[in-house]
């Protein structure tokens, strides 16, 4: 066992010594040779033996130091998380650390002395041969990336300068960057999707810096389609130069608030501030003011992301509707005033008509009263006198006809003079009017060719319907007072 360990140790020392590019110290065989009996017997001087002894001690110290350096070098190589390989100019492996042997599942002693190109597919070996050849020709550090079996590696080739300034060995450091590459690829794909969305959207997307003078650092192609500006025409220019003066005054405090927050260190790192919603006007390339509605979000500490949409047509429609609404309201107010005036005139006309109707009604009643008065007070007494003037039967017949005719004349006029709200029959109305004219029951019976009992029955019915059947109220006086 001890012999095997010594043999393995000797192989490692020899390999590491070759890797470090140092010549070995005098071997133990030479030391033994120097200490052989023949040599010792050749010189018998004491001081010569002492010199030989000092040389042997120095040789042992050098070997110990060399072994210690070799152990440190090997430990440093194995401590690295990267794959370390030492190659000569032909690509032969002179040394490799644990990461290399574990990566290929090949023992380290089997790797040393074998061509590195045998470990890789042809396309990978060709790329690495070219990189090593470049390092040999230029004596410069060469860096490159390649892919093997779905994994990505970052390689750096460092030339080793010998003491005679020659370069025959190269240290190759390979780092597995698969995770980084996949992350970069995923980020690239995400960025590409976002780029497509931003560049294909019909919204206006811009990024403005406010670190110094506010200026555009990015605008999407929609600025050219909608506003007529090419992106390169806007980069570096201040957005406020294109904004309507009224809106500039209104939205300027938003930018000042960001600047104050930044100067005071109040901006949230890794986050964003509150979204600002804005409606503003921007002048297009043709000199027209376009209404834009958008949101402003903070990006980091120096940029603002602005996403806007052209709402000029909507605003114009709203303004037209507002104008039409005001015009309609004006027309409604004017029409209302006209209707009010007409209503007032109608009220005045109705009032005048009402007065006229009242006057007509009063004149009618006065006329009826006059006719009734004249018939009852003027014609009636003379008719009575004629009846008592000794007329023959024929003349009395004519007189009765004349009296009946007069009664028929005044009956329609006197109908409204009777209490209108009562439900008197036509016969009762005729009798009530005759009572009102001062006729007695006998006279009424004679003029109507009815019996006195019938007239008395009608009088009772009239009093009942007028609500005075049990009162000591004169019927004629009552009828005269109600007209």
Image (cartoon, rainbow, N blue to C red):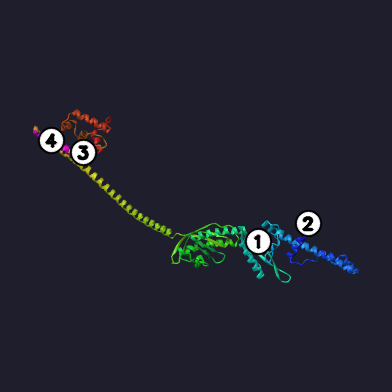
Front label number (3 vs 2): 2
Q: Quadrant of residue 168?
A: bottom right
Across and down, in percent, residue 308 comes to: 49, 60
Q: Nearer the viewer, residue 325 or 432?
A: 325
Front label number (1 vs 3): 1
The residue indicated by pointer 3 is 414
* Circles 1 and 3 in contact, beta carbons < 8 Å: no
Pick whichever of labels 4 and 2 is earlier in the sequence: 2
Helix, strand or loop at mark 3: helix
Circle 3 crowding by C-alpha within 10 Å: few under 14, some 14–19, many from 20? many
* Circles 1 and 2 in contact, beta carbons < 8 Å: no
Front label number (4 vs 2): 2
Q: How many marks?
A: 4
Residue at the image point whose x is 83% and y is 65% from the top: 31
Pick whichever of labels 4 and 1 is earlier in the sequence: 1
Image mark for residue 455: none
Image quadrant containing the C terminus: top left
The residue indicated by pointer 2 is 4
Pick whichever of labels 1 and 3 is earlier in the sequence: 1
Disc 4 to disc 1, C-alpha distance = 159 Å
What secondary structure is the magenta-colored segment mainly? Answer: helix
The residue indicated by pointer 4 is 401
Disc 4 to disc 2, C-alpha distance = 177 Å
Across and down, in percent, residue 146 comes to: 61, 62
Disc 3 to disc 4, C-alpha distance = 20 Å
The residue indicated by pointer 1 is 118
Q: Quadrant of residue 137?
A: bottom right
Q: Nearer the viewer, residue 98 or 5?
A: 5
């Amino acid at each position: 066992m001890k012999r095997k360990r010594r043999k393995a140790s000797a192989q490692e020392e020899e390999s590491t010594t070759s890797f470090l590019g140092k010549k070995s110290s005098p071997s133990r065989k030479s030391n033994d040779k120097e200490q052989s009996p023949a040599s010792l017997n050749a010189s018998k001087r004491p001081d010569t033996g002492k010199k030989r002894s000092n040389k042997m001690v120095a040789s042992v110290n050098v070997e110990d130091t060399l072994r210690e350096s070799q152990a440190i070098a090997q430990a440093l190589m194995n401590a690295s998380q990267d794959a370390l390989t030492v190659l000569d100019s032909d690509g032969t492996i002179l040394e490799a650390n644990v990461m290399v042997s574990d990566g290929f599942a090949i023992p380290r002693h089997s790797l040393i002395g074998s061509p590195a190109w045998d470990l890789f597919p042809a396309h990978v070996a060709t790329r690495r041969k070219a990189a090593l050849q470049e390092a040999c020709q230029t004596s410069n550090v060469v860096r490159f990336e390649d892919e093997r079996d779905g994994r990505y590696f970052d390689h750096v080739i460092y030339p080793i300068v010998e003491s005679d300034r020659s370069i025959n060995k190269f240290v190759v450091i390979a780092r597995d960057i698969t995770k980084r590459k996949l992350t970069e690829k995923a980020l690239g794909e995400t960025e590409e999707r976002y780029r497509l969305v931003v560049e294909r959207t019909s919204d206006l997307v811009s990024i403005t810096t406010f670190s110094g003078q506010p200026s555009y650092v990015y605008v999407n192609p929609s600025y050219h389609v909608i506003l007529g500006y090419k992106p390169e025409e806007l980069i570096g220019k201040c957005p406020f130069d294109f904004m309507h003066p009224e809106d500039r005054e209104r939205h300027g405090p938003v930018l000042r608030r960001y600047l104050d927050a930044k100067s005071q260190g109040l901006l949230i790192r890794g986050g964003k501030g509150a979204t600002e919603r804005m409606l503003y006007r921007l002048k297009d390339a043709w000199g027209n003011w376009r209404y834009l509605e958008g949101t402003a979000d903070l990006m980091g500490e120096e940029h603002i992301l602005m996403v806007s949409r052209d709402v000029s047509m909507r605003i114009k429609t709203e303004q037209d509707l507002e104008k039409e609404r005001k015009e309609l309201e004006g027309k409604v107010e004017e029409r209302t005033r006209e209707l009010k005036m007409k209503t007032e005139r109608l009220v005045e006309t109705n009032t005048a008509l009402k007065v006229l109707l009242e006057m007509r009604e009063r004149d009618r009643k006065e006329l009826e009263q006059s006719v009734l008065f004249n018939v009852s007070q003027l014609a009636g007494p003379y008719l009575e006198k004629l009846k008592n003037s000794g007329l023959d039967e024929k003349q009395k017949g004519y007189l009765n006809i004349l009296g009946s005719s007069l009664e028929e004349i005044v009956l329609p006029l006197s109908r409204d003079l009777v209490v209108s709200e009562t439900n008197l029959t036509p016969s009762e109305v005729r009798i009530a009017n005759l009572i009102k004219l001062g006729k007695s029951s006998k006279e009424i019976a004679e003029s109507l060719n009815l019996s006195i009992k019938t007239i008395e029955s009608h009088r009772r019915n009239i009093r009942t319907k007028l609500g005075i059947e049990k009162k000591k109220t004169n019927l004629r006086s009552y009828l005269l007072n109600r007209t």
